[in-house]
Image (cartoon, rainbow, N blue to C red):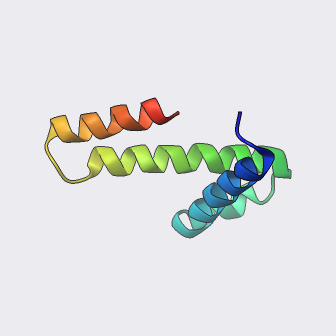
Amino acid sequence: MPSSKALRLAYAHCERQTRLQARSFWAALCLLPPGPRRGMAALYAFCRKADDIADGDGTAEERSERLAELRRSL
């Protein structure tokens, strides 16, 4: 399990990414209490990263491998 500092930094990163990349979604998340808001931001950040990989450059095999790497990193 990551340290509480590492976890706080990870959640802050996810919230920052969500705020920058999905402004209207972020506005809606701000209506949630802090715990659920952090969780939803983390879920959004993961989905956004996976979508960017799937829609990104490279062959289907390369994108598939990058998605597999993302899954392994969980």
Answer left or right for 68 relative to 29: left
Residue at figure coordinates x 26%, y 34% from the top left: 64
Percent of width and height locating residue 20: 56, 69
Residue at figure coordinates x 72%, y 47% from the top left: 7
Percent of width and height locating residue 60: 17, 38
Q: Is residue 11 above or below residue 64?
A: below
Total label count?
Answer: 0
Residue at figure coordinates x 37%, y 36% from the top left: 69
Residue placed most toward the observer, 20 or 72: 72
Q: Is residue 33 above or below residue 73?
A: below
Most extreme residue toward the right, as rendered? 33
- In which quadrant of the rendered image does the N terminus lie? top right
Residue at figure coordinates x 17%, y 35% from the top left: 61
Quadrant of the rendered structure where residue 62 is? top left
Most extreme residue toward the left, as rendered? 59
Percent of width and height locating residue 18: 59, 60
Q: Is residue 67 above or below residue 41?
A: above
Q: Is residue 7 above or below residue 68?
A: below
